[in-house]
Amino acid sequence: MVLFYRKSTTLNLKASRLVQLHLLETGMLRNDILCSLSSFLSCCRQDFSSITDVKVCFRERLRSGLINIKKDDAVALFHSMIRSNPLPTLIDFSRLFSGIAKTKQYDLVLDLCKQMELNGIAHNNYTLNIMINCFCKSCKTCFAYSVLGKVMKLGFSPDTTTFNTLINGLCLEGKVSEAVGLVNKMVENGCQADTVTFGSIVNGICKSGDTSLALDFLRKMEESNVKADVVTYSTVIDSLCRDGCMDDAVKLLNEMERKGIKSSVVTFNSLVGGFCKAGKWDEGAKILKDMIGRKIIPNVVTFNVLIDVCVKEGKLEKAKEFYEEMIMRGVSPNTITYNSLVDGFCMQNRLGEANKMLDLMVGNNCSPDLVTFNSLLKGYCKGKKVDDAMKLFREFPEKGLVANEVTYSILVQGFCQFGKVEIAEELFREMVSCGVVPDAMTYGILLDGLCENGKLEKALEIFKDLEESKMDLDVIMYTIMIEGMCKSGEVDDAWTLFCNLPLKGVKANVKTYTVMIWGLCKKGLLSEANMLLRKMEEDGIAPNDCTYNTLVRAYLRDGGDLATSAKLIEEMKSYGFSADASTVKMVMDMLSDGRLEKGFLDMLS
DNA sequence: CTAGGGTTAG
């Protein structure tokens, strides 16, 4: 290959390309390495080549694929194109822009588009569509609309792709009804809505969480002359898997196949993930086998799903086995793979191994990102090493990382749990002044931390502001406040808030009821707490093991009402729950100082 | 040369 390059006649370049293809097909060289190599050789050639050869150089690059092109490389390529004479065609620029867009560097694409214009090269419909797509993917549909304006002003006609891109952008932003409105506009403009149009909308509906509406839409699509394809089916199948409706998901898969639409690796990834997340490991393994049987090759996402499920279940050894298997099968791990593994070690307080995994990650050319470092911060906080966490956090700028609301949440939570609530508050202020917008979860963590550290007044103040703001407060936030009030001994206020939840349009869940039951018990109002247990059942909320254990311990405490606790334990066992560690410890303590008789322990098991 | 589906963190 090097020899062919050295004497770069057209024939030799063709020969070199054949060698490259051979290397790729035989798997002797990875595509990204090959790209770098041919780019290097091309550059060497430039030293003694004419301007025509420079043109061949970038054409060659654009054709040989820009897979995973890095920023510096892309910028250099762009500049070599701008400098060449005659100028490259807009098709060449489109190829470059779309290659960069595939790596999700949308800002870079938009920046280069601007530079292209400044160099006197005018857009066409294609490059403008790419710009619209970049704005849409960055959730800036308003700017995408202004590009649409430019399309019209320049005398181009927006085509189906232009509208589909915008419709998808609106759906990504959650503006599904606006997207549907644009479908009408599209038809008015003489463009046909197609499978992609409806696919985007079905996806938008799924993302809004309304799977049954998405199913209705799919049916309507089928009735009209727009046939749904594997992408649209997979979208709905994925939603069903997320909802845990695995039977319906499999039914839809079969229906799709009956219609002659072949499932893909994406379809199966959703199903494998769905079964494993539902704890149905056997079914997960079965579907994985089914997938391989259908000659659908598991890819990096398949393994990432499997690894992540194992990590979440605490099955780190099994996760590592899948990691080994993916490498054995020639599937390259990516940043997400390592992020799951790093997170797994952090969650189990195995920080040394987490850092070793980080080294392995870097060694395998996967760049750690904000998610990686956020996991490490969480690990340090969990391991009570808040100082190490802070040190790592302060290294973010030099690593080129910009902390987000997750980063601050982890730190705020860490410092609150460590009893250093002032530092947590300081961090919260820093977050706001850095322009990071706290969301409901960030506030929840702060309020919980304040309550936990005896700062109920402060928490109430913030909570009042939040209630008056536009932020959507959910049941979790109210539960945190009810718990905070109970912890601070303000059980009456907690009860008032609890009773007012329906007025605020918030539905209490099992955690809310359990927290309120705990508060009532704390105040010694045991029969009221017991009544609340009955009330929650009436309200259609099933008590869980935590609810029962809370009440059982309350009745046991102070040598209290042993008969009622025994009755509650029997009831709890009949629902398949058992005494938790705290309850068992309490019983053991009471046995040892004689407040309980031996028989009580037998009842627990 | 452009458009729709799957994986990670609080």
Image (spheres, coloured by chain):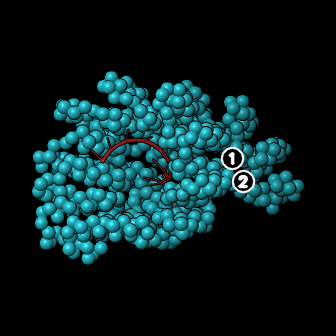
Crowding near the residue tagged with mark 2, few <14, some 14–19, many ≥20 C-alpha atoms within 10 Å: some
Which residue is found at the position 75% from the left and 52% from the top?
A579
At 74% from the left and 58% from the top, the residue drawn is A585
| Residue A581: quadrant of the picture | bottom right
SS for tag 1? Answer: helix
* Chain name for mark 1: A
Q: Position of residue A53 (x, y in %)?
A: 17, 64
Residue A67 vs A536, above or below: the answer is: below
Name which residue type carries label 1: Cys
Q: Which mark is residue A105?
A: none
Number of residue marks: 2
Point out the tag, 1 or 2, that comes first from the N-terminus.
1
- Chain in red on the image: B
Query: In this image, A51 relative to A225: left or right?
Result: left
The residue at the far front in this view is: A11
The chain letter for the residue carrying disc 2 is: A
Circle number at residue A580: 2
In x, y percent, where is residue A152? 21, 31
* Res A47 → quadrant: bottom left
Rendered-image quadrant of the C terminus of chain A: bottom right
- What amino acid type is highlighted by mark number 2? Asp
Q: Secondary structure at mark 2?
A: loop
Q: Residue at x 14, y 46 (%)?
A: A121
Tell me, what hue is chain A? cyan
Q: Residue A204: which quarter of the image?
A: top left
Q: Is residue A121 visible?
A: yes
Residue topped by disc 1: A546
Q: Are marks 1 and 2 in contact (CB under 8 Å)?
A: yes
Could you tell me which quadrant the N terminus of chain A lies in? bottom left
